[in-house]
Image (cartoon, rainbow, N blue to C red):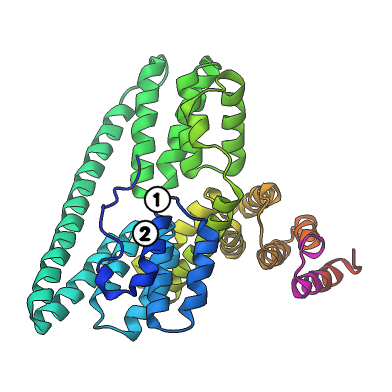
Amino acid sequence: MGRSLPSWDVPFAAESLPKEHLPLLMAVGTGMTDRIRFLEYFEEHAAEHHEGTYLLGLAHLQCGMPFGALLILSRLADERPEHVPVRVDLATALVHAGRPETARKVLEQTTETLTRRGGNLSARWLREVGERVAWIDRTMELRALEREFLVLRAAAWSEIPSEGAPSETLLLQAQTLCALGELDEDPAPLWEAAGIVVEVLAAAPGRISALEMLVRIARSGLPMSAQRGALDSLRQLAPGSPALKAARASTLEERALRRREGESEWYVIQGDIEHGDDETRQRAVERIQRRAMCGDYRSPFLAAWISFTSHADHADRSETLRGLSEEVTQETDMAPDDLLVIAESLARCGLRTEALDHARRCAHQTDDQDAATRAEAFMEALDGTTR
């Protein structure tokens, strides 16, 4: 199941923007223009004035990049706290980024601004903002009820002994756990669901419905190696499966945009860790772990999670790090600086061979001369020779 998203107008108040830019801003949402060139166009205007920065934030929202929009619009909202359309569009970005509680706080502050200001326009905006607050409240309430239902259902399924249970029963249990894991963005139920589906496939290797469910679970929260294995099996047995179409290879444009959005999400999560309360920081760490395992651009998240793991004190730390190192090896889109962070983290834990492998990759597969030089120096210090 996907996250419930509102059909709110973007921008909130088109009348507050320069008219000459609106046709292009609206065109991208219908796929009528190249999104990369579209963003570059608004990046050029962003340096000129506040409206240009505002348009750039809206452009990210129109391109399906809420974390990029969040970074831009939050800075602009801090600079112009009384600018109602900016704050309302920031709330939209927050909702699309999975942060409805924060979005609600932004809208509450906007309501206070509009109440103080008064006037016919404020009255209309106040009504529309109120509708958005009501949508968030309703959605959060429904989400809580759905979670309660899934927890109770998962508990009921767990009472049924797996040994001798029909495969249909086991797949229903896995489906419930998968939905719970997706709702909470929690990998633990997803791993449990994957174990159940693997059990079904051990008894019936060619069962298409089980393979399709494993693909869904893998894409939601399993390591990339598990995703590839599930996809390969499904391609062999059911090349026309809808699950394969949903996991189709991205275009170059999509990969470039997802990388940019992944970098923006990383900056947002860094802010949560540096400035958030204990609960916010804990959620941020859990998000890093999940994004290190799956997602469209894993580079900074893999580096961060390997760094966290290298500082942890548990018996299977080295084995865990070796598994993560293998994930890095299979990831084709790694940033040079992230590879060097990974090499340093692995070396700190005595995994010299793996550390050298990633440092060598950083040195030899990048056009970033600074990163390459630092990687060579790291290898010299670790191995006594430049390779």
Q: Point out residue 21 in the picture as x, y percentages from the top left corner.
A: 39, 69
Q: Secondary structure at mark 2?
A: helix
The image shows residue 115, relative to residue 28, as above or below, that is below
Left or right: 35 as drawn, with respect to 74: right
Q: Nearer the viewer, residue 253 or 272?
A: 253
Residue visible at 58% across and 31% down in the picture: 231
Q: Which mark is residue 26?
A: 2
Q: Which residue is mark 1?
A: 30
Secondary structure mostly seen in the magenta stretch? helix
Mark 2: amino acid: Met
Q: Which mark is residue 285?
A: none
- Label 1 sits on a secondary structure element that is loop
Q: Whole-percent x and y of residue 314?
A: 57, 56
Where is residue 244 shown, x and y percent of the image? 52, 31
Q: Position of residue 257 (x, y in %)?
A: 53, 57
Residue stretch rendered in magenta on the structure:
362-375
Assess whether residue 365 is covered by the magenta stretch.
yes
Can you say which quadrant of the picture contains the N terminus? top left
Q: At 39% from the left edge and 30% from the top edge, which residue is drawn?
A: 174
Q: What residue is at 25 percent from the left and 71 percent from the top?
A: 15
Quarter placement of the C terminus: bottom right
Residue at the image point whose x is 47% and y is 28% from the top: 242
Relative to 122, residue 177 above or below: above
Question: Left or right of 361: which side holds 315?
Answer: left
Mark 1–mark 2 contact, CB under 8 Å? yes
